Amino acid sequence: MTRIRLDGPMSRRLFLKGSALVGCSLAATPFLTSVTLAAAPWDQRLVVIILRGAMDGLDVVRPVGDPAYAAYRPTLLTGDPALPLTDMFALHPDLGDLMPLWKAGELGFAHAVSTPYRDKRSHFDGQDILEAGTGLDVPEPSVRDGWLNRMLQGVPGMTAETAFAVGRDEMKVLIGPAPHAAWAPDAKLVLSAQSRRLLGKVYEADPLFHAASMEAMDLSDRMMAEAPDKAGGMAGMAAPVADPGGKAQPDKIAAFAADQLKQATRIAAFSINGWDTHNGQRAALKRALATLSNTILTLKADLGPVWKKTTVLAMTEFGRTARENGTGGTDHGTGGVMLMAGGAVRGGKIYGRWPGLDDAALFEQRDLLPTADVRSYAAWAMRGLYGLDSGVLEKTIFPGLDMGADPGLLL
């Protein structure tokens, strides 16, 4: 698979400017997910997956050994039996394809985790806080970079190659001064005649923006001319990521990410949508878990021997309520689950301290009580992979974080 070159006649500056202007048309494809890539001077690989919509950790990794659990989920637990992990926990049956990874020690989970976000339970704020990595429970407008980008900024000798954002989702976790650009799968960087006239009309009175919009349109023409619809061109790169109907296929995005990770890229981040399960959770979660399972298995298969050097962290903005609601779903909650996979992970374990589900133990008498900051697992992973100093992790990359004791996440 080829890359989009940003060091030739079409400069990085021109590409960034042009892609920002045509971004509105690319965002019209609502079912695409996002992927960002960055190069680094290490040999270890890190993949961060943002699970947008608040995954129900109590359904994914079920605390079947807790006496209160079954009473909270009278209908959601019907159907295929969960798969035993430990005496306390069982895995959702639709992640059954990942059981070989669990048994091989390449899959683990951290339960009862969350960001510092509390009470308001807004997807947008929750995701912003998750990707910013701040120690605040409200979004901080002054924080304009994500924790992965801050990590890249602070590494001596880091040679960031390129970072790509795919589809409508902005991967804020990697946004910041470290170089990044936009790339959309199955989207043509070309404007219709009507769109050209509209842009020209909107900006005709502003010399600066009129010139920039004309430059972007010229860029669009050149990119399509230089990368026609054939393998190796932009459309060729896009084809594996989305089907002709525009439906998201994160497993194929994972294949694209794996291809880059086998080369110069060392860090990849992308998102998977579909985790908001207010009603009909059994069917919705089945689809989302199949996507997550396929994504992880695609990474393992396509990375080949590089899988042994890889850590995958999948995290969500918050968990869901302990009790199911009246429409076969669950509502926005607090504590949830983080998934970790890869050949570099010490899997076959459920990390974290289980708080219990009796009424007195629940957060606000409705949610799983968080007993660990999800950022601490990401911090320990980066310390183990890249040797980053704890002080830098706690003060700069994750401001205000207390990493606590080393959970021994990595081999």
Image (cartoon, grey):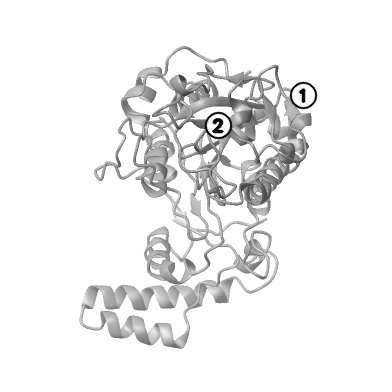
Mark pair 1, 2: CA separation: 18 Å
Q: What residue sits right under mark 1 in the picture?
A: 103
Name the spot of residue 256 as percent of width and height, x first: 64, 51
Name the spot of residue 238 as percent of width and height, x first: 62, 63
The residue under label 2 is which amino acid type?
A: Met
Element marked by disc 1: helix
Along the line of sight, the residue nearer the viewer: 282 or 227: 282
Task: Give the residue at x 43% y 77%.
Answer: 218
| Residue 61: quarter of image | top right
Name the spot of residue 302 as percent of width and height, x first: 73, 43
Q: Residues within 10 Å of mark 2 (few under 14, many from 20)?
A: many
Q: Is residue 311 left or right of residue 25?
A: right
| Residue 127: quarter of image | top left
Q: Is residue 323 left or right of residue 243?
A: left
Name the spot of residue 100 as percent of width and height, x first: 79, 30
| Mark 1 or mark 2, earlier in chain | 1
Along the line of sight, the residue nearer the viewer: 227 or 302: 302
Q: Is residue 263 left or right of residue 355?
A: right
Q: Is residue 246 above or below residue 67?
A: below
Q: Is residue 371 visible?
A: no
Q: Is residue 18 visible?
A: yes
Q: Is residue 255 above or below residue 333?
A: below
| Residue 411: quarter of image | top right
Would you say the residues marked 1 and 2 are in contact, meaning their CB atoms lie under 8 Å apart?
no
The residue under label 1 is which amino acid type?
A: Lys
Element marked by disc 2: strand
Disc ID at residue 338: 2
Q: Residues within 10 Å of mark 1 (few under 14, many from 20)?
A: some
Task: Give the residue at x 54% y 18%.
Answer: 354
Along the line of sight, the residue nearer the viewer: 283 or 380: 283
Disc ID at residue 151: none
